[in-house]
Amino acid sequence: MKVIYLHGFASGPSSSKARFFYQRFQGLGVEIEIPDLAGGAFEALTLTGQLGVVERLAAGAPCVLIGSSMGGYLAALHAARHPEVRKLVLLAPAFGFARRWLQKLGPDLAGQWRSQGFLEVFHYAEQRPRRVGYRLIEDGKQYEDFPDVRQPVLIIHGRRDATVDAECSVEFARDRPNVRLELVDSDHQLLNVLEPAWQLTRDFLEFR
């Protein structure tokens, strides 16, 4: 069964976590694909556009989704609308992406972004500042904070995450018997716990 890895915001297929999981799945002989969710148009990024990338790649076939940060939120949104998805592994998922980002920016910065039409952010994959359009927020507001995912879910979230509070995952997992939440001693990147995260992922997906 195909595995699709969804990278985070201002990241890409060459991120440290993406490369790590690619190598591990390749070592097991498991097919894994890591799309560029921005499709080369970062300034015009939207959740809808990214979900379109996932939908085209999944093509209605059974698959496993692994998502990091915003990619985790996208994985949950897609799975809630596509029952053919078998399982999900979410790494520090950024549930409620648009609402939380506006809260974090505060009314002044959010208003400036809306009036200017763009916000300059650091793009980790390209290692340089890039503009992202306010349409990302306008489009994102139409999506639910916590998608109604019915498939088995493994969430791995760092207790010291300063970007997406682990309480978001705690709230999502509450009263959902299909969700297994593993809180680990790490930050948002989870780079110091990649090997334990891989062991959890491999066991959860039952890949040997």
Image: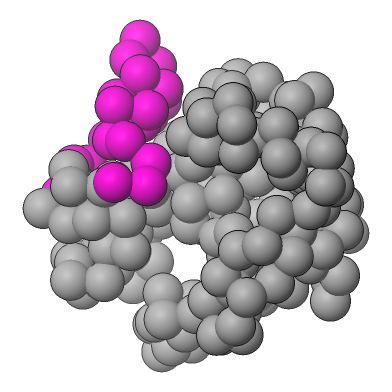
User: In the picture provided, is 206 more to the left or to the right than 10?
Assistant: left
Residue at x 83%, y 38% (from the top left corner): 115
Residue at x 79%, y 23% (from the top left corner): 142
Q: With respect to residue 91, does 32 lie above or below? A: below
Residue at x 60%, y 39% (from the top left corner): 109
Q: Position of residue 11 (x, y in %)?
A: 58, 71
Q: Magenta stretch containing residue 179, yes or no?
A: yes
Q: Magenta stretch containing residue 201, yes or no?
A: no
Q: Position of residue 185 (x, y in %)?
A: 11, 53
Q: Position of residue 72 (x, y in %)?
A: 53, 48
Q: Quadrant of residue 23?
A: bottom left
Q: Position of residue 152 (x, y in %)?
A: 46, 35
Q: Which residues are magenta?
A: 162-184
Pick the quarter of the image with the C terminus: bottom left
Q: Quadrant of residue 153?
A: top left
Residue 179 appears in the rendering:
yes
User: Residue farthest to the left?
Assistant: 185
Q: With respect to residue 191, does 190 lie above or below? A: above
Q: With respect to residue 41, does 113 lie above or below? A: above
Q: Nearer the viewer, residue 179 or 163?
A: 163
User: Residue farthest to the top?
Assistant: 175
Q: Nearer the viewer, residue 1 or 160?
A: 160
